Amino acid sequence: MSDISTNIGPLALKNPVMTASGTFGFGLDFMRYGDVSTLGAVVTKSVTLKPRAGNPSPRIYETPSGMLNSIGLENPGVDYFRKKTLPMLRDTGVTIIVNIAGENVDEYKKLGGMFSDKDGVLALEVNAGCPNVDLGGMQFGRDCGVIAQLIEAVKGATSLPLIAKLTPNVADIAPIAKAACEAGAVAVSLINTLLGMSVDVRKRVSYIKRGVAGLSGPAVRPVAVRMAWEAAKTGVPVIGAGGICDVESAMQFLLVGAKAVQVGTSNFTDPTFVFRLPALLSDFLDEMHVPKLSSYIGSLKTS
């Protein structure tokens, strides 16, 4: 049986399968479908300083091979999460990565200071890529200097390792990924959703109340794989995400250099898939006669 453990900088995971923030809630609702402790890690939905109601409906719309969403970081706020949700999630035995989001650098810094390894949290994922909010979000992930300032600020407030979740809505992801890690992030996760829009030509309105929204699902996978490859070539640890719906799509990210993968939209279409994926990855490597995942990661032939 192949060894599918992986290391993302200083983070050691028993397997490379993670959940993508915003697609798995806080993990508790999915316990009916499988044992969350068997996953490499659960990345929580975004946690903000204050409770957020999210964007008005309609805020989800299915597209060809994908989905538009404009949830708007709906969550009960950090105080509720720390007091009520985190203890229950910790009791499951799962490896926990908390995604944090703020409207400005100071909010991110405050959030970072509220978590430590004493909470049973492995790392923080700094959301610098959400396209569905007016303040914060992807504006932090579009500029090397800004992402560096953000990561440095959060790093100064917590001892936990930081993962920068980046937006794909940029001209060149490589320098931004490198800037995030040079500022103190141990890895980058990408991609967040692509900006998209779909309209009703009879009613003459957008299918999403807010107009534009984040596009995810298999439709974005080629873009996501390309960006994972570009970022990994700079030498930064990468967590790949975008349209993973079967074992081969997950292996694409690993082959181009990602150290782990995040399953997102598939959690809506088949909530059992993420629980089955670790075994599927192991079987794939056995079939390929590859004893260790680490020897497959980044082994794409370029000539």
Image (cartoon, rainbow, N blue to C red):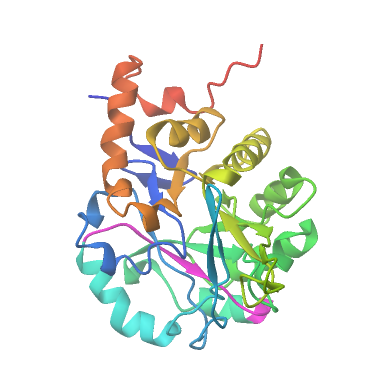
* Residue 301 sits in quarter: top right
Please tell me which residue lies in front, 118 or 30. Answer: 30
In the image, residue 275 lies at what x, y percent? 27, 48
Report the side of 2 relative to 263 (left or right): left
Quarter of the figure that contains the C terminus:
top right
Location of residue 268 with respect to 290 vertically, above or below: below
Quarter of the figure that contains the N terminus:
top left
Report the side of 104 relative to 291 (left or right): right
In the image, residue 53 lies at what x, y percent? 50, 86
Please tell me which residue lies in front, 268 or 122. Answer: 268
In the image, residue 43 lies at what x, y percent? 41, 60
Name the outermost residue toward the front: 202
The residue positioned 23% from the left and 54% from the top of the image is 37
The residue positioned 68% from the left and 62% from the top of the image is 197
Location of residue 119 with respect to 76 vertically, above or below: above
The answer to whether one can see residue 212 in this image is yes
Please tell me which residue lies in front, 18 or 217. Answer: 217
Location of residue 26 with respect to 226 vertically, above or below: below
The residue positioned 22% from the left and 57% from the top of the image is 33
Name the outermost residue toward the top: 303
The answer to whether one can see residue 3 in this image is no
In the image, residue 134 lies at what x, y percent? 70, 78
Q: Is residue 27 magenta?
A: no
Bounds of the magenta span?
93-106
**How many marks do you count on the picture?**
0
